[in-house]
Structures are given as C-alpha cells and as structure tokens.
Image (cartoon, rainbow, N blue to C red):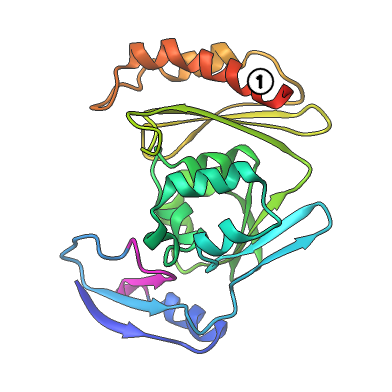
Amino acid sequence: MIVAYLRPKNIPEILKLLENQDQNPVLMGGGTAIDRFTLEPLTIIDLQELDLRGVKEKGNTLEIGATTTLQFLHDSPRIPEILRNLIRIEATSNLRQIATVAGTLISSNGRSAFTSAFMAIDAVVTLLPGEKSENLGNLLLMRDGMLDSKLITKITLPLNVKLAYQSVSRTPRDLPILSVAMAVWPSGRTRVVLGGFGASPLLVSDGPEPGGEESAVREACMLAGDEWASSEYRMEVAPKLVMRCFSQLAS
C-alpha cells in the first residue's frame, strides 16, 4: 500500500530519504515491479529526476545507467545481438519502454533470461553511498539486506567476452523452464549460469578454463523440480544445453 510519493531532485536527497527505513522507502525507476500486492505501507521514491540513464563505452567495458530502459538498451548499437534477443524474451514491447535495467535485474527470479546473461558475463553493480561495486550474482543472493539504504547507479559489463545462451520453454517467446548462459573470456575463463527455476539464476561453474560444466549443471538440477518441470527432466536436458552453448560459441 503506497502511503507517500516523493520525487527528489538529486542523489544526496535520495540517500537521506533511504536512511529512514521506518518509512519503508522503495525506489522506483520504471515502476513495473512496484504494483505487487502488499499490506505494508510504502514510501515511493521516484528516480526520474536523476541523470542515471544511458549506455557508455569505457575501454573494454560498457556502463549502463541504472534507470536506462530495456528498450533503450535494446536499441543501443553497443550491445551484442544475443542480448537484444534476450531483452525481447524478457519483456513485451510495452513493458520494455518502462522497465529499467536495474529494476529488472533486482526484481527478477530464476526464469529471467536477461539476468542469467548478465550473471554469466559477471556484471558488476555500483551502489551508493560509498561507490561500492558488487558482483551481480552476490547481490542477488543477498538482495534484501544488501540493498537497504542503497541506490544502484550503474551496471558495468565486459565487452571482451563471448556469450552463448540456450534454453527450453513451452513456446519460443516464453520464459524458459531451463536455460544455460555461458560466457568465455579471451583468457579461457568460463562461467556457466543455470536458469529457469528458483529465486534467481544459479552460478554453477566459474573456472580459468572450460571443464566439468556438464556434470556441474546436472548436479545443480538434482533438487530443481517445480510446477514447470521435474528435477529428472532438468538433469537430463541441462548437459545438452551446455553442449549447445559450446557449439554456439564455436560458430
């Protein structure tokens, strides 16, 4: 239940408002995740006045402003085509005009193709106060406590990484019931993220070179049964998706 709406003009104002946790402050970028039913009184802090939008190339990294919309990111010439495809899976055209990058990542669950890809390429989130940088995967595991009194300003992605994504779903444009996102660095470092179930995508492998990914995803699916698919089904399919990712990267 929304009891107050505030639209501060600058970051110091917002940080001061966030200090008062008794008011249950909730940051609003696009607002697509705020309309969830709750009996708790909420104070909405609108971020529209802040200059946190845009996509900027910086060396071998891409900096994405926290309130950049999914559609703006989709249309940016700086992102790879595979991320454009995942954005289209993540949200409909209307939602993409409103939903922000930071809001989508923080409110996502394990079925988010967009979040799985960002985790695989080891996206880094910058938080205020303190200009603290946090790995996206760690942030999602502890998002409730770690984000108290914090403002996300940007998300940073490496540009020298190859990304592959494979999934199974009920329809081609549906969210996955099982997915594998794989990223490979020029050094050989390989990260594999499993999605399609749970509270957030799951990092199952991060090594200096490829090896053991099939067994890692199979083991991670042992307790992954839910209303969408059984754990046995996911255990059987996950290694196949890993091999498809390797083929996708090779091609």
Q: Residue 79, how many percent across, how many down?
A: 67, 52
Instruction: Confirm whether the magenta stretch covers residue 29.
Output: yes
Quarter of the image with the N terminus is bottom left
Q: Can you identify the residue that label 1 sits on? A: 246
Quarter of the rendering containing residue 106:
bottom left
Residue 146, above or below 43? above
Q: Is residue 245 left or right of residue 184?
A: left
Number of numbered callouts drawn: 1
Three-letter residue code for mark 1: Phe
Residue 48, above or below 130? below
Residue 226, above or below 238? below
Instruction: Confirm whether the magenta stretch covers residue 137.
Output: no
> Which residue is at the far left?
39
Q: Residue 117, how many percent across, how many down?
A: 57, 40
**Within 10 angstroms of label 1, few (less than 14), some, or many (20 or more) residues?**
some
Element marked by disc 1: helix
The residue under the point 59% across, 79% down is 51
Q: Residue 191, how many percent across, how many down?
A: 65, 30
Bounds of the magenta segment: 21-33
Q: Is residue 247 left or right of residue 159?
A: left
The residue under the point 23% across, 27% down is 227
Q: Is residue 138 left or right of residue 195?
A: right
The residue under the point 42% across, 10% down is 236
